[in-house]
Image (spheres, rainbow, N blue to C red):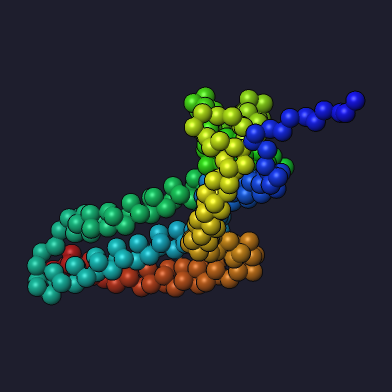
Amino acid sequence: MATELAPVSPNADPDLERLRRELDLLKGEYIKLQTDKQGLLEHTGPQLEALYAVRVGQPRLALLEVQLEAERLRRLCQRLQAALNRREAVDLDQLAFEVDVELLNLRQQLTDQAAQVHAAQHLLRHLHSPEKSDEVRRLYRQLAKRLHPDVNPALSPADLRLWHAVQAAYQYGDLPSLRAYALLAPGDELPEDQPGHPATLAEAIRQRLPVLAEGIRQLLAGLEAIRAKFPFTLEKQLKDDAWLAEQQQLLAIELAATREQITLLQARYDALRAAAEDA
């Protein structure tokens, strides 16, 4: 008796396996680039800014502080000299008050920069170990492949809520939560029979391939634009001890020169003040 052939599925397509492999490759590339982008914006960027604030910004802050003091003395001398030239009586306390008011914005900038340096020091003290950082990225990439709406257009509302929770956990480096979400997330298989989808799975995949390809192109362009901006333009230099030493030396030279200016300005102010008190 002849062996009966198994019925052919109406959705059968000779290219289906090839299409599945192509889809999987594009999904993997898309998620990798998306993860790289978020990693740059939420982790690498802040860490580079923190490195800059501590290694360059901190000595620059010291320079700005003495430059502000030099500017204060310069303005005091100018105002005092002008009053003496006009033979006017001078209220020294009022004069100092007016100059300090003029410099309030600069003092606030210094305060803000000092806060940035403090925040940067805190961030760098509380970084994950390389092993934990690698696990955070690995788990996020796995979860993104299952839950990112761009590569999983048929997510349920519950899955979307889980995706938002995953994003928040990744932003804050919450490794325990990411481990838990990995147990809750659905698989990443493409469903074969969903309302509103094309008649065949192969056609569904064909329609998604160009969408993902365009998404990859946009992500590549976005990554290039991100890396062309501060602080990424200084990533190599911030990890170069010789470059950092050179920058710190230049700032130290400028700091010493400004302190010399302060000494001269202070002597001039003391002389003008004595002349005003004698007038």
Can residue 169 be seen by looking at this rendering? no
Residue under the image location 28 percent in, 55 percent down: 105
Q: Position of residue 127 (x, y in %)?
A: 62, 43
261 up-or-down from 20: above or below: below
Asked where in the image residue 241 lies, by quadrant, the reply is bottom right
Nearer to us in this view, 75 or 270: 75
Q: Position of residue 249 (x, y in %)?
A: 56, 70
Asked where in the image residue 172 lies, by quadrant, the reply is top right
Residue under the image location 49 percent in, 26 percent down: 157
Can residue 91 be seen by looking at this rendering? yes
Residue under the image location 49 percent in, 45 percent down: 119
Nearer to us in this view, 31 or 269: 31
Q: Could you tell me which quadrant the N terminus lies in?
A: top right
121 up-or-down from 79: above or below: above
Residue under the image location 65 percent in, 34 percent down: 10
Q: Could you tell me which quadrant the C terminus lies in?
A: bottom left
Asked where in the image residue 48 lies, by quadrant, the reply is bottom right
Task: Judge left or right: residue 110 versus residue 28.
Answer: left
From this viewpoint, which residue is outermost toward the front? 1
Q: Position of residue 183 (x, y in %)?
A: 67, 26
